[in-house]
Image: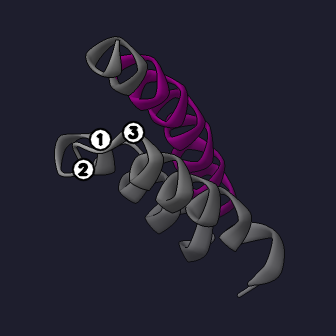
Amino acid sequence: MEGTSLFVWGMIFGIIGVGFFTYGKKQKTTVPLIVGIALFAIPYFISNVYLLMIVGGILVAIPYYIRI
């Protein structure tokens, strides 16, 4: 069950990361661009579902609080 959950959460954060990446690339803003790259890279390095959800949630929230 954990493997399936890890895959699904990785896909969700990957899709959100692609959205942030394309937005940051079009608008030429660095924070969404970097967060987008991080979001579709973290499922390769984190193998715990709960840790993936926490880190992914923090990364999704970063562009709303940091505006550069």
Q: Secondary structure at mark 1?
A: helix
Residue extending furthest toward the right: 64
Residue at point 31%, 51% (across, down)? 42
Q: Hey, what amino acid is under mark 2?
A: Ile
Residue annotated with mark 1: 43
- Residue 54, percent across and down? 54, 58
Q: Amino acid at mark 3?
A: Val
Name the residue: 44% across, 22% down: 11
Q: Is residue 64 left or right of residue 59?
A: right
Report the mark closest to the observer, 2 or 3: 3
Q: Is residue 30 left or right of residue 6?
A: right
Q: What secondary structure is marked by label 2? A: loop
Label 3 sits on residue = 49
Q: Where are the magenta residues, as a range?
A: 7-28
- The residue lying at 46 percent from left, 47 percent from top is 50
- The answer to which of 13 and 23 lies nearer the viewer is 13
Q: Is residue 11 magenta?
A: yes
